[in-house]
Image (cartoon, helix red, strand yellow):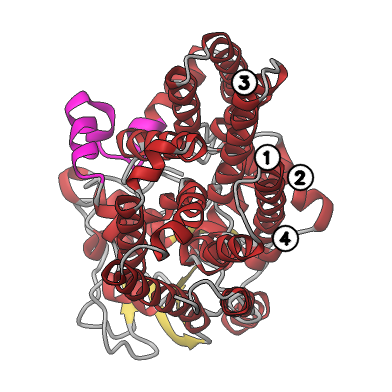
Amino acid sequence: MSLLLNQKFILSLLLISAMVSTVSLYQREIGTDDAWFAEQSYWFAKNGYVKSELFRGLNNVEDRHLAYHRLHVWQGALAYKLFGWSAYVFKTIMLVYLVVFLLASYLLIKKYQLFESRLEYYLFYTFISCYSILAILFFTNRPDITIMTFGFLSFCMLFSALKEDALYKPLLAGVFAGLAVLTHLNGLVFMLAGGCLLLFEKRFRSLVIFSVAGILVSLVYFIILHDASDINLYLQQMRDNPALHEDDFGIWGTISKVLHGYRPYFHKGSDASYTLLFITMLWLGRKRIIQNDDLRKIFIYFISIAISLAAISPGYKSLYLVYHAPYVFLMLTILYRYVVEQEVSKRKLLVTLLVLFFFTQWGEVLSLLNKRTPQLADVHAEVSRSMGLQPGERIVAPIIFVFNGMDKYTIQSFHLYRAISGQRKIQLEKDFFRVTSEDKRTHLILTDHHLRDLGISGAVKGDRFGDYLYTGRHGPYHGFTLAPFRDRRPHPAARSPDPARGPAGQGPVPG
């Protein structure tokens, strides 16, 4: 027990966790989300509205993309305007929000003396710094850290309002919850959680103020919808979004999502170790949660987020667990000494779960080092030179090719073809080369994964695939050049243009 309550030992865990997370930043992978949201910010900065060339042909996004994450894209556009076009500019926005969260959590804990000693401060920030989902997201151009931070700021104001009866605090809490919604519609969970907490505490006047403020800020989401045609396009883009399922729009689908809401908690080993630790700690400390007013408030807020997130979130990815992780770690830290001082068998169980938690979290974070993308912009510049790409050419490429080819070429992502194949508009293996040729894509830059999706293996330089010649490897990619003539040998896996224009007479991607 002495080691578990040793301040220097906990501090050493904090330093190790902070070091592991910091090391993971080195040449951090530039991925799909980084590119997809960056392209939206680019067009908003350039045109004042969002469109997409990467997904041209899907839901009319090449003209207007209306179902996007408002504040996340807007702040990315501002960062681009101020600091230029770089994946790391967009990634760094999340670090800024992380700093805001860390400062807000420290001020809340200190003001209301949620912790009894410095050891608990060390333990709380150890949990925060080692949590793998947080480490992944605080340097990824996704809206989740922004949502988490606005949600936590809303909670801070609500917690303070329940301590001190000041009407401006539920007002600010509503504003921050509304900003979470404006960042991503998943932010609605903080509106619901805040409402549940105020209802439980019977603060009805504060509930009205909180709700009105939150709704008014949230309504800014619809500011880009000017008329009925915009509303219809928005609804169509939401309904036909490949990331959404028809179950996301029905009552029974919602019930099913809630019933299966446990799945993200066990998605992989690091998620399972996190889940087992907090469930065990909450169970062992259940009496104290009932008796302690602060713990009870935190628990109500946490469970409200967890249930509402399961109900409204499409797909309910394990990444979304970060929304309520701060409240889990607050509860674990407050309960820590209470659980450690219980009988030996429970203490041994706690030690086992803590060891499992720390090693799986550190391992997950360190695994990011195997996915690094060093000097990606330079690699893409060399690929462009090797393939002879000319400014303004229409190409198909990995989505991350926007770094730094965004303003050099008209880039369509291979992700698009997976999406429209999933919608049964084309058969990927059969129609890909025909559709790209008809859309006048002069070069195709594909990864090993893309070739597997197309059923291609063993291609040799000079092989023909429809109207394209395989030009071999160019850095990490495979190159194809539009050459619409027939005097080259076809590869066995190649598909010639289909005179029937695909299944059921489907034409090329609109464009």
Which one is earlier in the sequence, the residue at label 4 or at label 3? 4
Q: Which residue is mark 4?
A: 89
Check disc 4: other Cα within 10 Å, few if <14, some if 14-19, many if 20+. some
The image quarter in which residue 91 lies: bottom right
Residue sitting at 54 percent across and 35 percent down? 63
Q: Which residue is mark 3?
A: 223
- Say what secondary structure mark 1 lies in: helix
Task: Tell me residue 307's x, y (percent).
Answer: 33, 36
Check disc 1: other Cα within 10 Å, few if <14, some if 14-19, many if 20+. many
- Say what secondary structure mark 2 lies in: helix
Q: Amino acid at mark 1?
A: Trp
- Say what secondary structure mark 4 lies in: helix
> Mark number for residue 74?
1
Marks 1 and 2, how far apart at CA = 6 Å
Check disc 2: other Cα within 10 Å, few if <14, some if 14-19, many if 20+. some
Check disc 3: other Cα within 10 Å, few if <14, some if 14-19, many if 20+. few
Residue 257 seen by the camera: yes
Q: What residue range appears in magenta?
A: 237-261
Which one is earlier in the sequence, the residue at label 2 or at label 4? 2
> Mark number for residue 78?
2
Cβ atoms at labels 1 and 2 below 8 Å apart: yes
Task: Tell me residue 206's x, y (percent).
Answer: 58, 14
Q: Amino acid at mark 3?
A: Ile
